[in-house]
Amino acid sequence: MDSKKRRKILDKKKAIREVINRASSFADPLSSLPSFRRYSRNGLSVFLESDRGDKLSSSVRQYIRMLLRMNMAGFHGSDWRIHEKVKHREMVSPDARYIFVRELLNGRINEVSKGKGMEVCDQMAGFVHYRFTLEEEMPVLYVYEIQLESRVQGKGLGEFLMQLVELIACKNRMGAVVLTVQKSNSLAMTFYMSKLRYKISSISPSKNGACESYEILCKTFDPEARSVLEDDDDDHDHDHDGRTSCKKHQVFRTKKGNNERDAVRKER
C-alpha cells in the first residue's frame, strides 16, 4: 500500500473517531430537541431525561436491573444469569447513554427540594440505553436496550422513542441505527421490521451462516453505511441518492387542547 493511500485511510479513521467523540461529548442530547421532552398521547403523559452510565444513582441502577429482569429473563431462559451479568457491566459504562421515561403525575412535572438541588419524584416507566460506536468501521448509534414497563406499552411510546433515537443519530452524523433482537421475541421483531422498517443487517449471524438466538437489525442513513451494513438484495425505500431517514425527518405541528408543539416524524 502506497503512503498516500495509507494516509487517506488513517485520515478517514481519525475523522470517524472524532465524529463519535463529538457525539458522545454532549451531556444532554434532548436540550436541542425540546419537543421530545414530553409525550402525551393515548392516555399517557410522560417526560424524558438524559443521563450516562457512570453517573447513575444506586436507585436508578437498581431500577434498570429490575426492569431488565422483568422484561428479558423469559427470552433468555436458563442463560439469563450469564446475560444479566453482562448487562449489569454494560449499564454503568462511561460510554452508556440513557433516555429515561418518567410518568407525569397529574399531567405535570412534580419536584421536591433536596439539598441544593431538585429531585424528580415522578415514577420511572422505562429507559433507552444507547451508545455511539463503530460497526464494521462505520459510525453508528447502537441501541443496547429499549425497555418499557407493561403499563405504558401499546400507546405509541416505543415508536416515539425510536424516532427520537434515529433523530439523535442523524444529528450526530451516524451512518445507521443498529440493535439486537432475540428471535424468540416475535413482537419486537415485528415492531422493528414491519412497523419501523428495520432490516436484518449483513453482519447478523443468520446472514453469515451462524445459528444464534438473535438477529442484528439496522436502519441506514447513507449509501456507504448501506453498502456495509445491509444486503444488496434488500428491498429498501431510498431516495434517489441512496439516503433514507435523515432526509425524511420533517417538523410538523400537532395540537393538544389549545397548545401547539413541534414534533418530528418520518414520512413513509
Image (spheres, rainbow, N blue to C red):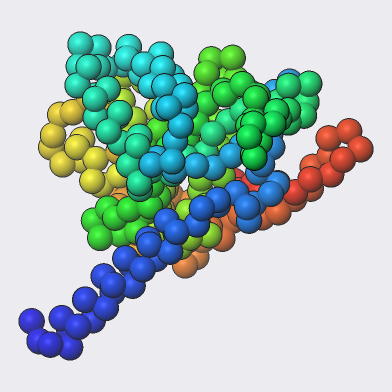
Residue furthest out toward the right = 258
Q: In this view, does 208 lie above or below 28?
A: above
The structure residue drawn at horizontal position 18% and vertical position 28%, both measured from the top left corner, is 212
The structure residue drawn at horizontal position 56% and vertical position 60%, both measured from the top left corner, is 247
156 and 52: which is toward the camera: 52
30 and 77: which is toward the camera: 30
Residue 229 position in % (x across, y down): 30, 52
- Is residue 254 at least partly visible in the picture? yes
Q: In this view, does 231 lie above or below 110?
A: below
Q: Is residue 245 above or below residue 199?
A: below
Q: Is residue 22 above or below residue 184?
A: below
194 and 254: which is toward the camera: 254
Residue 240 position in % (x across, y down): 50, 65
- Is residue 191 at least partly visible in the picture? no
**Side (left or right) of 233 relative to 124:** left
Residue 44 position in % (x across, y down): 70, 23
Residue furthest out toward the front = 115
Q: How many numbered badges does the structure rendering display?
A: 0
Q: Quadrant of residue 106?
A: top right
The structure residue drawn at horizontal position 20% and vertical position 35%, both measured from the top left corner, is 206
**Side (left or right) of 175 relative to 122:** left
Q: Quadrant of residue 22?
A: bottom left
Residue 139 position in % (x across, y down): 34, 59
Work out which quarter of the rendered image holds the N terminus and state it. Answer: bottom left
185 and 81: which is toward the camera: 81
Q: In which quarter of the image is residue 134?
A: bottom left
**Side (left or right) of 175 relative to 9:** right
The structure residue drawn at horizontal position 40% and vertical position 33%, both measured from the top left corner, is 145
